[in-house]
Amino acid sequence: MLLPETSIESARTVAERLLVDLHTINLSIPELGDLVVSASIGVAAYRRGDDNVDQLVSRADEAMYAAKNSGKNKVCLTEAG
């Protein structure tokens, strides 16, 4: 998701609201039983000097894996710099 002209803290708030909303989705699959939807979300901000969107996506991806590796169903931000 791209959020133009949004601070990284505001983007974190959007991502955290998304986690709450996703958690309200309950699925019932006969073979698997009742399931709850969760997500691990990485948030990254554009940095002056980024040559292409791949750099931004790569940082968001790293943050997403940090969220997964630290307990899942959470939001992690990339470090500033």
Image: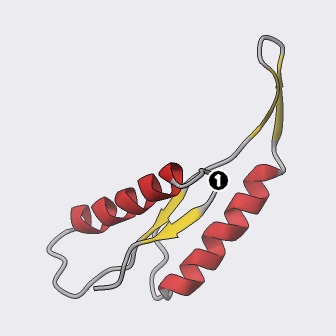
* Disc 1 residue type (three-letter): Asn
Left or right: 44 with respect to 27? left
Left or right: 1 with respect to 10? left
Q: Name the residue under label 1.
A: 73
Left or right: 63 with respect to 81? right
Seen in the picture, residue 6 relative to 78 is either above or below; the reply is below
Left or right: 2 with respect to 39? left
Which percent across, then down, holds residue 39? 62, 50
Count how many numbered circles sit on residues in the image.
Answer: 1
Q: Which residue is drawn at 32% across and 80% down?
A: 46
Seen in the picture, residue 65 relative to 12 is either above or below; the reply is above
Seen in the picture, residue 14 relative to 70 is either above or below; the reply is below
Q: Residue furthest top?
A: 31
Residue 18 sits in which quadrant? bottom right
Colour scheme shown: secondary structure
At mark 1, the secondary structure is loop
Q: Residue at x 77, y 17 (%)?
A: 32
Q: How crowded is mark 1: few (under 14 residues within 10 Å), some or many (20 or more)?
A: some
Q: Which residue is drawn at 67% across and 69% down?
A: 16
Q: Residue furthest front?
A: 70
The front one of 58 and 6 is 58
Which percent across, then down, holds residue 23? 78, 51
Q: Residue at x 30, y 68 (%)?
A: 56
Q: In which quadrant is the C terminus drawn?
A: bottom left
Which percent across, then down, holds residue 58? 29, 60
